[in-house]
Amino acid sequence: MNKVKLRDLGERKAVKLLRDILSNKSIDITSMEDDCAVIDFGDEYLLVTTDMITQQAHIPEKTTPWQVGWHVVAINLSDIAGMGGEPLGLVVALGLSSNQDIKYLEGIAEGMNSCASNFGTSILGGDTKEAETLTLSGCAFGRVDRDKIMLRKGAKPEDLVAVTGKLGNGGSAYQSLKNDMNIEKAIKDLMEVYPRVKEGIALSKTKVVSSCMDISDGLASSIYQLSNLNELGFKLDLSQIPISNEAKAISMKLGMSDEELALYFGGDYELLITLKKEGLNTAQEALDEIGTELTPIGEVIKEKKNILIRDGVSTLLEDRGYEHFRWKS
């Protein structure tokens, strides 16, 4: 009998396999399907998340140690942001070669500290171990009022779909690296991501969001994850999706579609939300106060089918994006 490899499953099916095996004990109200584990903590929920980066999968050549440190903190805080949480702190485990220059370790620490401080939190501790490949694993803690938490599950038919900021910077940075174009800027865009912590808190306070997640693996992939969890479909209007100027410029230079960069590449770390139509103004006003755009890009539909409207023509939104064990450049 042929053995099933992780590359045959992909990350999301591998996580489901683990979820089906691991006992929940009913303290995690989201059954491991959300951006964070959620633990009942009196009048609040305690949020706990972990995310890991490795030299091979995440860290381009010429990345500075400061950028490595910033990145591992930022991606963990993005999960807290996706649930509307206020960060409480992080612990980070570092796997480094014994031959690594001590200055490199100092640079990582400075990057971690800079990112944590920027979002009003701190590094509480962690661990260091010898490793052949540079590996950093972060664990972030947050809190959110019970009545303000934003979960992935909760979308309803006729809800609007909206995103913060602009999409495509992650994809354009990846393509720039692949094609040896503006390497320094590409690394900066990939590694110095800016988690939407303030935006998540602001949206949670409005209480108009029915579901939310951060877009770390690409818009299309995120849509399919929400669709599967909510047993509903999504209809997106390509003309309404806010695509970054960088993505437009890179796609033009390379002769590819900016749609490809905005929908099917990871690394944007914006928030994807659903909300009732009457709540849109409230949500937009909340984000206007902190200088972030919230753009409606479609709606939730009853049929479990994800549609992309391009030039007035409805097509099936492809189910692809960044996924560990499967990703190929």
Image (spheres, grey):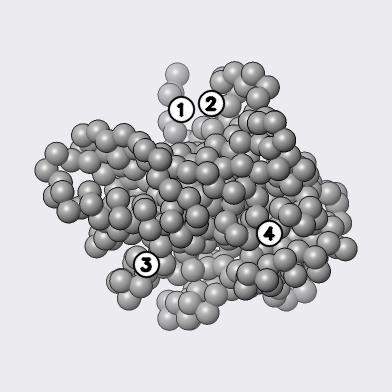
104 with respect to 269 (left or right): left
* Amino acid at dot 2: Leu
Residue 323 seen in the figure: no
Residue drawn at (60%, 59%) of the image = 198
Q: Position of residue 308 (x, y in %)?
A: 71, 63
* Amino acid at dot 1: Val
* Amino acid at dot 3: Lys
Q: How many residues crowd mark 3 within 10 Å: few (<14), some (14–19), many (20+)?
A: some
Task: State the residue position of label 3.
Answer: 188
Task: State the residue position of label 2.
Answer: 18
State the SS at label 2: helix
* Amino acid at dot 4: Ala
74 with respect to 260 (left or right): left
Question: Label 4, label 3: how many angstroms apart (C-alpha)?
Answer: 27 Å
Residue drawn at (72%, 35%) of the image = 43
Question: Label 3, label 1: how many angstroms apart (C-alpha)?
Answer: 37 Å
Quadrant of the rendered structure where residue 174 is?
bottom left
Question: Label 2, label 3: how many angstroms apart (C-alpha)?
Answer: 34 Å
Task: State the residue position of label 4.
Answer: 202
Residue drawn at (66%, 36%) of the image = 45
Q: Nearer the viewer, residue 163 or 219?
A: 163
Labels 3 and 1: the sequence-earlier one: 1
Mark 4 or mark 3, which is nearer to you? 4
Mark 2 or mark 3, which is nearer to you? 3
Q: Nearer the viewer, residue 307 or 241?
A: 241
State the SS at label 1: loop
Quadrant of the rendered structure where residue 186 is?
bottom left
Quadrant of the rendered structure where residue 124 is?
top left
Labels 4 and 3: the sequence-earlier one: 3
Labels 2 and 1: the sequence-earlier one: 1
Mark 1 or mark 4, which is nearer to you? 4
Task: State the residue position of label 1.
Answer: 4
